[in-house]
Image (tube, helix red, strand yellow):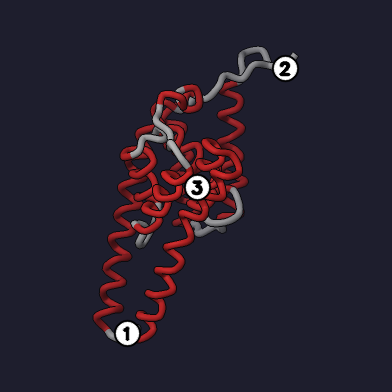
Amino acid sequence: MHPHIPESPARTAEDDHPRPHSLRELFWAFTWLALQGFGGVLAVVQRELVERRRWMSNEQFVEDWAAAQILPGPNVVNLSIMVGDRYFGLRGALVAVAGMLLLPMLLVVVLAVVYAGFADQPMVAGALRGMGAVAAGLVAGVGCRLAASLRKHPLGPWACGAIAAATFVAMSVLRLPLAWVLPVVGGAACALTWRKLAPAGH
């Protein structure tokens, strides 16, 4: 017999959250999300899906975002596919991706044309550098909010903190490629969590 692996608390609580009522709602939700994502979409997607619409809990978001990061392609596009597929299957995945990409792509094309005419202006360059600082602050703030969900992680907050610190050192101090950090640190975290969830004696 296969050992019973307890379900993630994030997944067992999934039905307690609201869900999109239609493909139209799903499309416009991801369109609005994408249009807010200037300088970094992580802060926006967490606020929209977890805090505003409550389509998932903070724990579910952490799990899905982690899975989206290890898949090829843009993280937020991967996440939109996962959310759309969860509620409406293949149609939902396609609609969510369309909402994420269609109008923002048109807007980026227009902005690129405008930017090409003003790129040499010092004021424009300074404004963009200022937005970079805001984007960094947004990402840091979201990281602090997501860290609260680690209190319910099977490994406990101290082990999760150590893994997060190892990832930070590898990426920011040692400047190791992401293709190395994910398999090594991420693989170790997955293995430790699997052992923790497995019943004793198996």
Q: Earlier in the sequence, mark 1 or mark 2?
A: 2
Within 10 Å of disc 3 (Cα), the crowding (few <14, some 14-19, many 20+) is many
CA distance separating discs 3 and 1: 33 Å
Give the residue at x 52% y 42%: 84
Q: Amino acid at mark 1?
A: Phe
* Foreground: disc 3 or disc 1: 3
Residue 67 image position (x, y, % from top left): 55, 42
Per the image, the residue denoted by label 2 is: 2
Observer able to see residue 167: yes
| Residue drawn 36% across the image and 35% down it | 54
The C terminus, quarter of image: top right
The structure residue drawn at horizontal position 54% and vertical position 38%, both measured from the top left corner, is 88
Instruction: Give residue 80's mark.
Output: 3
Three-letter code, disc 3: Ser
Residue type at numbered disc 2: His
Which residue is tagged 1?
118
Give the number of the mark in front: 2 or 3.
3
Give neighbour class at mark 1: few <14, some 14-19, many 20+ (Cα, 10 Å): few
From the viewer's perspective, tell me whether residue 58 is left or right of residue 85: left
Percent position of residue 34, x then y: 40, 56
Q: Which mark is residue 34?
A: none
Nearer-the-camera pick, 162 or 152: 152
Badge 1 element: helix
* Label 2 packing within 10 angstroms: few (<14), some (14-19), many (20+): few
- The x and y percentages for residue 183 are 62, 46
Residue 99, placed above or below residue 121: above
In the displayed structure image, the side of residue 103 where residue 8 appears, left or right? right
